[in-house]
Amino acid sequence: MRKKIKIGVIGAGHLGKYHINHLSKHANIDFIGFFDTNQESAAKVVKEFSVKNFEDMDGLISSSDALHIVTPTNFHHEIAIKCLQNNKDIFIEKPITSNTAQATEIIELAVSKKSIVQVGHIERFNPTINRLMDIVSEPHYIEIERLAPFQARGTEVPVVLDLMVHDIDLIISMVDSNIVDIHASGAKMMSETVDLAHAHIKFENGVVANLKSSRIAQNYVRKIRTYQNNLYTITDLMIPQIEVYGLEKTSIFSNQCIEKSIDTAGGAKKFIL
């Protein structure tokens, strides 16, 4: 029987609780416990999930094979370095750090220690995104909106690192070409960092992506629109649903479950997946 991996969580805030909940219930994991600097909050987590609270981070690190780092971003670098120096594998919630210099240091240390570093870009594993990747093969133009109502959590970094980082990661995986030009603008509204941002990104092969992220919106919005020859898609990650528009049904739908098709203006077809 394979030995279970001993995992601990550093940070038991909003996101940390999700990690603690899932890890403590995972059949193939030996969940060691968690550490949080706020002992009052930690006591509530112990009561809610029936897990162990470590009084100091060093004790948790030494007792674990791997750690999940789920603290505010400005603490990621310091904690990650400490874990790697102790030869531990780590999962870091996105963004990895506040700047590229800190991220590079973490990566270089992980390589030298032969340790694993995984960053929490969960959209890569979203089934709806994976389905969209199967449908869209040669996009010419991509629009992505990621909006959210304001909350203080996460405002230690700009909205680009808080929300848009998911979409930057997605378009880089969708477009097999180098970036040649970026135009961006943003504004501070509710915090000391940028809360609203637009980015216009052009790739060497001519593909253009427009990204909009805001954390001062009325409602949550997660929408992706792609355009390529004879194919237009609207993906709503909140439902989730993909609408596909084309002049005719093609082989791209052969392995898809089509819920309904609708005749639209001009003889085009709309397929909802």
Image (cartoon, grey):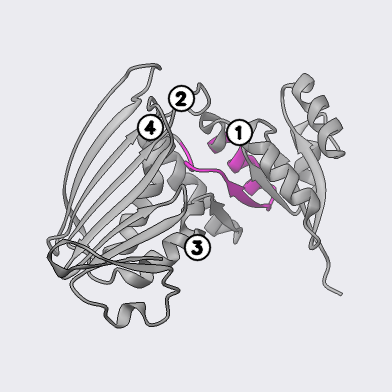
Report the side of 139 relative to 34 (left or right): left
4 vs 1, front mark: 4
Circle 2 or circle 1, nearest the eye? 2
> Rounded to the nearest whole Å, what is the CA distance between mark 4 and mark 1?
17 Å
Is label 3 or label 2 in front?
A: 3
Question: Is 132 placed above or below 1 here?
Answer: above
Q: Is 196 contained in the magenta span? A: no
Q: Residues within 10 Å of mark 1 (few under 14, many from 20)?
A: many
Task: Name the one closer to the observer, 17 or 218.
Answer: 218
Q: What residue is shown with label 2?
A: 155
* Foreground label between 3 and 1: 3
Q: Which residue is mark 4?
A: 159
Q: Which mark is residue 71?
A: 1
Splitting the image into 4 quarters, where does residue 2 fall?
Answer: bottom right
Query: Crowding at label 3, few (<14), some or many (≥20) Cα neighbours within 10 Å?
Result: few
Residue 178 location in percent, x, y? 21, 60
Q: Which residues are magenta?
A: 77-97
Instruction: Name the residue tied to disc 3.
Output: 127
Under circle 2, the secondary element is: loop
Name the residue type under label 2. Answer: Thr
